[in-house]
Amino acid sequence: MDAMLKELINYQELLFAFTRRNIQMKYKQTSMGVLWAIFMPIIIIFSGVIVRKAMAVLAGAPLTSQEISSVAVKSLPWAFFVTALRFAVGSLVGNMHLVTKIYFPRIIFPLSYVLGQSLDFLVAGVFLTIVFIITKVGVSIYLLWLPVLLLFLFLLTAAFATVLACWNLFYRDIRHIVDVLLTFGIFYTPVFYDASMFSGLRLFFLLNPMGSLLENINRVVVLHQPPELIWVAYAGLWAIGGAIFAWKIFEKAEPQFVGEISPQRGGLRFRQELWRKKNEK
Amino acid sequence: MKAIEVNGVWKKYRKGEKFYSLRDLIPHITRNLFQRRNAGNGELAKEEFWALQDVSFYVAKGEILGIIGANGAGKSTILKLLTKIIKPYRGEIKVHGRLSALIEVTAGFHPDFTGRENVYFNGAVYGMKKKEIDRKFDQIVEFSGVHEFIDTPVKRYSSGMSARLGFAIAAHVDPEVLLVDEVLSVGDMNFQSRCVDKIRELLKSGTTIIFISHNISLVQNLCKRVILLERGKIIRSGIPNEVIPYYENSSLQQQEQIIKSRISKMEKNDKESNLQDNAACHVLNVRVCDHAGNKKEIFEFKEPLELHIDYMVTGAAQDIAISYEIIRSDGASCLAGSSLRDGFPLNNIQGKNSLKIKLSSFPLAPEAYYIKVSILDKDMLHSHVLERKGIFSVRSGIVGAKTKAILIPKAEWMTLGSQIRN
C-alpha cells in the first residue's frame, strides 16, 4: 500500500484532533459562535436573491420561489469551497513551527481545514433542509444522487486545498492569487444564475468543475430533474483525478518543506525580521 | 538487537538566496537560461555545504547513546533525520519502534487553549490515542506540577510552566526510542533533576535513548557510549572516558585559537600606546618552554614549565625587578611571583638580557592560559608590562578534569573506619 496513505491511517486520530482544534479555534473568542456557520451562506444567498431580482425586473417577469431555492442550494457548496480553500492555503505556512519541529504526515494540515469546514457545511445544510421543508420544496427520487455529488465536492475541495497549501509554501504569491480568484470566482461560476441562461456560454460554465457540480446539485435537489450524467462524470473525473494529482504532488514536495518554509510574509515573524534588519542598518 | 541504524547518511544544506515569490523566480529562470550553471566540482552545487558526511552508527535496544559536539556540528540534523522531519540526501536510516522526541516540547501548544486541551492535542501530535491520554492525564499533570492552572489558557503560563507541561507530555508517550536534545535546560533545578530521574526510569524499562547535551558531565553519567561530531563527521566514538577528554582537548585548542586572535588584535592597539610610555626598561618577549628549554604550547597535566623572558634596560634604571603572573583565559589570576620575593637580584643591568624562570610541577587545571610579565625599577616609578604573551594550554588526560577550579591536586583519600569519632 502507498506509504503516505499508511501514515495517514496511522495518524487518523491526529487528523481528527486537528480538525477539532481548527473548529474550536474558529469559534473561540467569537460572540456569534456557531451562528457563523450560517451567517456566511446567508449573506451569499441574499446577494444572490438581489441579483436574481434585478434580472427578473429587467426581464419583466416575477421572481419565483424556486429561483430563490436554487440560489440557496448553490450558495452553500460555494461557501464551503471558498472558505475551506481560504483557510487551507495558508495552513502549512501558518503552522510552520509544527512543520519544522515535529513529524507527522503534513497532509493533515490542509485536510483538517477542509474537514473542519465540512462541519460548518453540515450545520448550514441542516438549517437549509429545515427551511426547504417549511417552504415545501419537495423531494424526488433523484435526491439519491446528492451524496455522490457531495462526495465529489469534498474531493475536489480537498484536492485544491492540498495542492494550493503545498505551492503556497514554495511561492507566497499563490495565496494572493487564490484570494483574488476566490473573490471573483463567483462571477465565473453559476451560483447566482443558471448556466442555461447563457445559451452560448453554457459550455464555458460547465467546464468549470464547480459549475457542473452546482448545476447538478440544483437539478436533483430543487428542480427534481435527473442529473446530466455526462457532466456528473466530468466533475467526478476532476474530483478523483484532482485528488490523485494532489496526492502525488504532495508526496513529492513533502521532503522539501523544512528547507523551503519561512515565516508568512506580512505575518508577525516576518515583520519582526524586517524590523530587525532595518535596525541593523 | 538494534533499535536505530544509521548507514552512510549524507545531508546537504543550501545557503544563500531562495525564492519566495514568483516575481523573483521568473528573472532567475531567464538568467539561468542564458548563463550555464557551473556544473562539475562534485555533487555540491554553488552555495551548498554538507551538514552531515557519511555518518553511520547504531544504537542497540535499551542502550543510551550520547552525541556531543560543538554548535553546528550536526547533532540536531541527526535528530531531525531520525524523526523524519527531513530526509537524508543519501544513505538510510532505520528506527525500530515508536519514536518520541524531546525537542522543542512546546512547539505544538496553542496559546488560546487551556493546558488540558493542549495536553490532548499534543498527545495526538506524538501519536497517542485518546484513551491512552485519558489514562495518563493525571500522571502528566502531576509530573508537570501545573495542576492549579490546567484549565487556564497556555498564553497565561510562564515559559517555565509551559516547558514543564510540554516535557511531561513528551515523556509520557511511552516511546520505545526517545530522542533528547538539550531540553533539560528549561525549568528549575528541582524539575531538571526530576527529568533526569525520568530518563533513568525510562532507560530501566528498556527504552532506547539518544541523548544530546552540552552538559558534558550529564552525558558522562548517563551514557555508556558517546559519539563526537565535528563539522558533520563522526570523529570519535566509544566509551565516555575516551571520547570526552578528546572533545575537551579539541575545544580547548579552539578556545586557544580564539584567545590568540583576540590578543593579536589587542597588541596592535598596545603598540600605539607603547609609544607614549617612556619606561626605562622593557619586556621584549616571553616564551613558555618545557624543562628542556624548547618552546611549547600544549602541556600535559602537571608537566613542569619554564618561562623565558627577554628584556631591555636603558638609561637610568639599573636595579630592576621582574614579576610574572599566569592568567587563565577568562582573566582569573592563577599564579604569581617576582624576583624580589624570590630573592633574585637584578642589579647593574644594561642593554638586552634574557632570563628564565623554572617552575616546578603544579596541578594546574586543564584550560588555556597566558602570561603577564611586568618589569619595574626599584623605585617603582617606571614600569613596563607585557601582557597576554606566551599562550599555552594544559591538556586534560582524565574525564571530569574540566572544572572551574584553578588547581586539581592529587590527594590521598582514606576511610577512617565506619564510626564517627569525636
Image (cartoon, coloured by chain):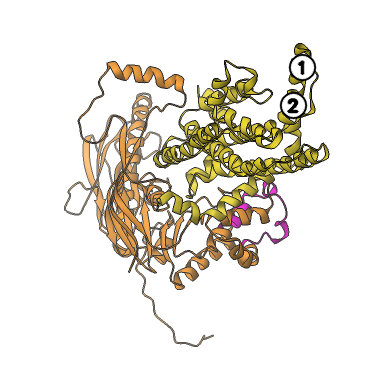
Per the image, is B166 magenta?
A: yes
Q: Earlier in the sequence, mark 2 or mark 1?
A: 1
Q: In this view, does B189 lie to the left or right of B366?
A: right
Q: What stretch is highlighted in magenta?
A: B143-167
**Disc marking residue A56:** 1
**Disc marking residue A2:** none
Badge 1 amino acid: Ala
Foreground: A97 or B134?
B134
Quadrant showing the N terminus of chain B: bottom left
Q: Which chain carries label 2?
A: A
Quadrant showing the C terminus of chain B: bottom right
Foreground: B45 or B416?
B45
Q: Residues within 10 Å of mark 2 (few under 14, many from 20)?
A: some
Query: SS class of the residue under badge 2?
Result: helix
Q: Which chain is displayed in yellow in the rendered image?
A: A
Q: Is residue A171 left or right of residue A269?
A: left
Q: Where is residue A104 in the image (x, y as percent from the top left)?
A: 48, 50
Residue reaching furthest to the right: A134
Residue B14 visible in the current orientation: yes
Per the image, is B218 magenta?
A: no
Q: Position of residue A184 (x, y in %)?
A: 62, 21
Residue B95 placement: quadrant = bottom left
Q: Mark 1 lies on which chain?
A: A
Foreground: A20 or B140?
A20
Q: Do the residues labelled 2 and 1 touch (CB within 8 Å)?
A: yes
Q: Distance between the residues labelled 2 and 1?
A: 10 Å
Q: Position of residue B391 (x, y in %)?
A: 30, 44
Name the residue carrying label 2.
Answer: A67
Chain B pictured colour: orange
Foreground: A56 or B79?
A56
Residue B343 visible in the current orientation: no
Query: SS class of the residue under badge 1?
Result: helix
